[in-house]
Amino acid sequence: MGQKKLIKFEAIGNYPNVLQYPENVVGTWKDFFKNNNPITLELACGKGEYSVGLGRLHPERNFIGVDIKGNRIYTGAKIALAEKLGNVAFLRIHIGQIANYFAPGEVKEIWIIFPDPFLRDSRAKNRLTHARFLYQYQKILVPGAKINLKTDSKELYDFTLETIAEQGCIIHENIADVYGKGKAEGSLAIQTFYEKMHLAEGRTIYFISFSLPDTPIVMPERFQAHESADRGD
């Protein structure tokens, strides 16, 4: 590990707004934030630019950026501390274990911003809108809560539309070209470093906002073989 990464890892170990694989936090986030404001998660938050941006826009809500890479979390955590954004925190964990850190109904909303699209079909199970992740989200979300995806990947956008149709999700907003249609307003107008880069390259930005069904998430047949192989069945 490089010296800069080591410095960042050491720093977040002392940051009060960063929790790394914490124990016994299920159902206690109101104590951490010292209020009962609704919680929004940014999954695969990277440098936490969206979490910080949302925290600035909505002081009446709490935001938690979730990522496994502590050296990236460092950037957003440092900014949030410098700006005294007490409603922004960061959680270093594997997203696949998200249900181990929140109680049922403890999360009000999820944002997924420019995640890795995992373009190879063999890696589709790693997409954050795959049914196996939706299954985890359903355990912690308030019924009817929104999941928001912002991406420059047409493949991930199409995959997500297919997945939410299969699962019977409710689509609240579907924008095939955020900037071309002049829809970049409010929370949707926050731009990360990578989004600015994508826009400079002339890439299209897609957005979908949806909520999960009341019925349990099920694994589509086309993925069941992969899941069985992963478990060693």
Image: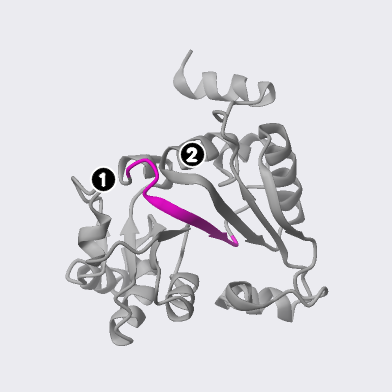
Residue 195 picture quarter: bottom right
Badge 2 is on which residue? 138
Amino acid at circle 2 = Gln
Q: Residue 224: where, in percent of width, then height?
A: 60, 21
From the viewer's perspective, is residue 230 above or below residue 5?
A: above
Crowd tier of the residue under label 1, counting other residues whose Cα lies within 10 Å: few below 14, some 14–19, many 20 or above: some
Q: Nearer the viewer, residue 169 or 72?
A: 169
Q: Residue furthest bottom?
A: 83
Task: Answer with mark 2 or mark 1, whichever residue precedes in sequence.
Answer: 1
Quadrant where the image shows the N terminus:
bottom left
Asked which quadrant contains residue 121, the reply is top right
Residue most extreme to the right: 180
Residue 142, compared with residue 187, is above or below; it is: above
Q: Nearer the viewer, residue 9 or 36?
A: 36
- Depicted 84 relative to depicted 175: above or below: below
Question: Looking at the rendering, which quadrant does residue 201 occupy?
Answer: bottom right
Residue 26 image label = 1
Residue type pointed to by label 1: Val
Q: Residue at x 75, y 70 (%)?
A: 178
Indicate left or right for 58 with 74 as reference: right
- Magenta region, residue range: 103-114
Instruction: Depth check: give the residue in front, 173 or 90.
Output: 173
Q: Position of residue 48 (x, y in %)?
A: 44, 70
User: Within the magenta stretch, is there residue 191?
Assistant: no
